[in-house]
Image (cartoon, helix red, strand yellow):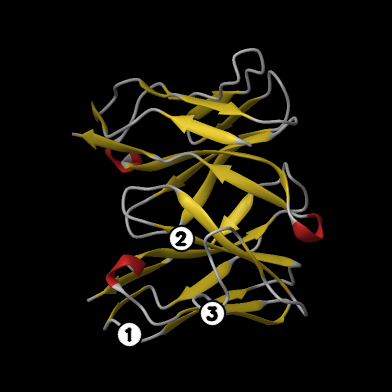
Amino acid sequence: SAVISQKPSRDICQRGTSLTIQCQVDSQVTMMFWYRQQPGQSLTLIATANQGSEATYESGFVIDKFPISRPNLTFSTLTVSNMSPEDSSIYLCSVEGESKSYGYTFGSGTRLTVV
Amino acid sequence: GDSVTQMEGPVTLSEEAFLTINCTYTATGYPSLFWYVQYPGEGLQLLLKATKADDKGSNKGFEATYRKETTSFHLEKGSVQVSDSAVYFCALSDRQGSGGSYIPTFGRGTSLIVHP
């Protein structure tokens, strides 16, 4: 299965600023996924990133707040813009397996605290 | 839509105790089922999976059986260790998103704390 390197692992940011999270995969993958995991909660899908096209956002998430780049088949970034304390969460990137039965591989996560 | 319901935690056990974490699901199709584990400060790792009814997934002493009649996928381990302390997520994969990918649906997670 793929290996994902995600960074930064954690950050403390001032409200109103932006943070860009990077994920590098050791193999070429078609789809990459970005999740948010709020304290004590499950994972919520933010968007799906396909190389060469605009990301597809889930209900409740918009491109202006969470712009995503996918310049090639091994790399993606998620930016959390104009941050507020409510954005304090763990953010995870993920890649899918070969089919729905294969399972998903996750990055180690970025723990964001907005003060 | 699809959903996954897990028992609420934390589950607190002594070392060598028997573990059960309940998971039930609703799905419109015929999903694959997964358990993921998240150790402190780390991302999620796939623990085990099952892709059809009556399949048993197993890994590191953990087991779960795909029960279609009860729409359940309970996680069990006969003798837990302190190192098993983590958050466990039940998930299903059935919803197809854009581009033909399958998007998993996760439960809320169950925290397991094992004391020496």
Residue at image position (28%, 74%) is: A114
Residue A7 percent across, percent down from the top left: 45, 77
Q: CA distance from mark 3 to mark 2?
A: 16 Å
Q: Are marks 3 and 2 on the same chain?
A: yes
The local crowd at label 3, few if under 14, some if 14 to 19, many if 20 or more residues have their Cα within 10 Å, is few
Mark 1 to mark 2 CA distance (whole Å): 19 Å
Which residue is located at x 40 percent, y 85 percent?
A18
Which of pointers 1 and 2 lies earlier in the amino acid sequence? Answer: 1
Element type at mark 3: loop
How far is the residue under mark 3 from the one under mark 1? 14 Å
> Which residue is the site of mark 1?
A16
Which of pointers 3 and 1 lies earlier in the amino acid sequence?
Answer: 1
Write down the residue under mark 3. Answer: A64
Farthest residue toward the right?
A: B100
Left or right side of B23 for A111: left
Picture layout, residue A104 above or below residue B31: below
Looking at this view, is B70 or A46 the one in front? A46
- Picture mark count: 3
Q: Is residue B64 above or below residue A24?
A: above
Percent from the top left, x then y, of residue A81? 44, 81
Q: Chain of mark 3?
A: A
- Residue shown at 67% from the left, 72% from the top: A55
Which residue is labeled 2 in the image?
A36
Image quadrant where one finds the N terminus of chain A: bottom right
Residue for point 67% across, 18% down: B68
Query: Looking at the image, is mark 1 or mark 2 nearer the viewer?
Result: 1
Could you say which quadrant of the image residue B81 lies in?
Answer: top left
Q: Quadrant of residue B64?
A: top right
**Secondary structure state at the residue bearing disc 2:** strand
Q: Chain of mark 2?
A: A
Disc 3 marks a residue whose amino acid type is: Asp
